[in-house]
Amino acid sequence: MSAPASHALRDNLTMLRRNLLHARRYPSLTLNLLLTPVILLLLFVYVFGNVMSAGLTGGHADRSEYVAYLVPGILMLTVAMTSLGTAVSVATDMTEGIMARFRTMAISRASVLIGHVVGSVIQTLMALVLVLGIGLAIGFRPDATPLEWLAAAGLMALVSLALTWLAVGIGLISPNAEGASNIGTPLVMLPFLSSAFVPVDAMPGWFRWFAEYQPFSPAIETLRGLLLGTEIGTTNAVLAVAWCAGMTLVGYFWSKARFSREPRR
Amino acid sequence: MTTKQTKQTTQTTQTTQTTQRNEPGLAIAATGLHKAYGDKKVLDGIDLHVPTGTVFSLLGPNGAGKTTAVNILSTLVPADAGQARIAGHDLVAEAQSVRAAIGVTGQFSAVDGLITGEENMLLMADLNHLSKQEGRRVTADLLERFDLVDAARKPASTYSGGMKRRLDIAMTLVGGPRIIFLDEPTTGLDPRSRHTMWQIIRELVSGGTTVFLTTQYLEEADQLADRIAVLDGGRIVAEGSAEELKRLVPGGHVRLRFSDPVAYERAATALRETTRDDDALTLQIPSDGSQRELRAVLDWLDAAGVEADELSVHTPDLDDVFFALTAGTAAPATTAATATKETAR
């Protein structure tokens, strides 16, 4: 017997409120994770900017060109970093005694996870606004139309949703916060092996194939196209959406299966 | 012949199941619960029957399987074998209905430490689908009743052990559960908090709630429980009221005190099997405390024409029962007690 739909909806909202309350009381985890993309943004623009831009433009150094290239990549890196926070907070939550209480209450079980996911996506979008603000402050000048902005926001929400569901699964298989952070690291490393910092053309041939088709590059290229009007290419757009849909489904069913297992003693 | 027998067996089984299903007045009815973790048998076929509105205590040493029993009955973990009905609902098929009827306070604090006590209570109100207004009212009521008003706006992680436990139980009560599971509710609490907790449990029962309590403290079971089951090594080794259990083990006696040395001597001669204490002028006669044995002692005294100044019946306390029934023997405890007394002297 499952709870009526209205109860399930209310449980989701209750759990969402709980997670947002946690985030508001203890924002340090999210803020710490935000630090990495912001520092990388400043480092790559002001320290490596001239050298990096020379590679992009074919010789002459132009820092502002590199800002334009980098910011979409940093935005996706932000999404990845904040999803790591989800893995850590889910792992921590699972070690809490209150989880046993939730399991013995007549509530929608999925609401525990859905609360985490929706809460994380909201936090990620807020983090993105912050990082984008810094980007604009250091000279990022997108030429997107309102519709393109909307599409860009939708894309980032989609990537965030996909990574967050995976992160929930990672959090559920981790014995504790440290474990979640370790297991989640490969996910956070992926943006570094994508077209976030340099074009994939600049990479060795054997590696280019991986860099081009892994989840982040298509998403970053699509985001660049939406914000800056560069060529997106149907492959990238389709791949980005397909990756997101795939990761969301895998993460969702994996998390659900893990959560309904017998709790650890 | 063989076929007929099989048929009969099947019918008997069906009858048993029907009986169990329709058994009125039972808050918890469990039969043949088994649970193993790996090759370690934690519960080895236990039956539990708890009438509605009573306190049932599962008493046992550490590792006896008490928490596992609570976890199974509260739908937290599935049993390997066996059946149970909680508040009339099947534990497996109607888990969600069972959950709606029960409240659980586990051994480890089940509060959200990151938010305040009040927020914890409101969270429970929301999850019990109470209206905003009703949720606020219940929260205010329970915080008041459990003496948590002053700490209501502080994060639960800053609470002391006793406060956390009180918040824990208050949270359990938000949904008005008919059956409450309390897994070692006073373990780790100081004596004052323990007595507060006992008071809380008594109030719950007077309100008609059924309480299923695990404890390793004999005094606690003695104080609170209508019925006690002693769990040891995954099996129930004894069950009954505290008094019934005490009668199971030897050690009970009738004590006669005299002020007149002559009467004392005459009684000592007239009665067999007595233990003398010449300094205190008291005699101890082994007895199970039953009416028949008491009458026999009185008849002997009448026949000898002596009158004791005081007659008292001493039944063994639950400690005796516990050590006699659970894996250890009474000897270590007795030695320990004696040693303590001697040290005290």
Image: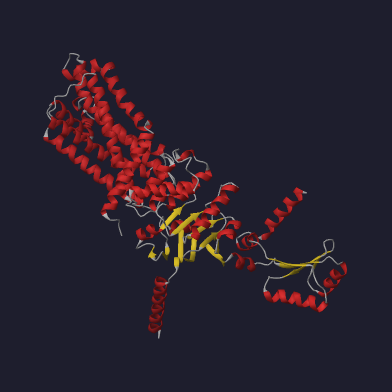
Q: Is residue B264 something that shows in the picture?
A: yes
**Is residue A43 placed above or below B7 in the rendered structure?**
above
**Is residue A221 placed above or below A252 in the rendered structure?**
above
Q: Tell me what residue is drawn at x 33 percent, y 45 percent.
A: A15
Q: Tell whether A209 sits left or right of A186.
A: left
Q: Tell whether B196 sits left or right of B341.
A: left
**Is residue B28 placed above or below A7 in the rendered structure?**
below
Give the total number of marks visible in the rendering: 0
Whole-percent x, y for residue B224 in the image: 56, 59
Q: Quadrant of residue B290?
A: bottom right
Q: Tell whether B81 sits left or right of A57.
A: right
Report the residue that reaches farthest toward the bottom: B1
Q: Is residue A212 something that shows in the picture?
A: no
In this view of the protein, which residue sits in the foreground, A77 or B115?
B115
**Is residue A120 placed above or below B64 in the rendered structure?**
above
In this view of the protein, which residue sits in the foreground, B242 or A137?
B242
Q: Quadrant of residue A219?
A: top left
Whole-percent x, y for residue A151 in the image: 16, 34
For the N terminus of chain B, the quadrant is: bottom left
Whole-percent x, y for residue A3 in the image: 30, 56
Q: Tell whether A20 sits left or right of B213.
A: left
Report the residue that reaches farthest toward the top: A60
* Colour setting: secondary structure
Whole-percent x, y for residue B212 in the image: 49, 59
Q: Quadrant of residue A208?
A: top left
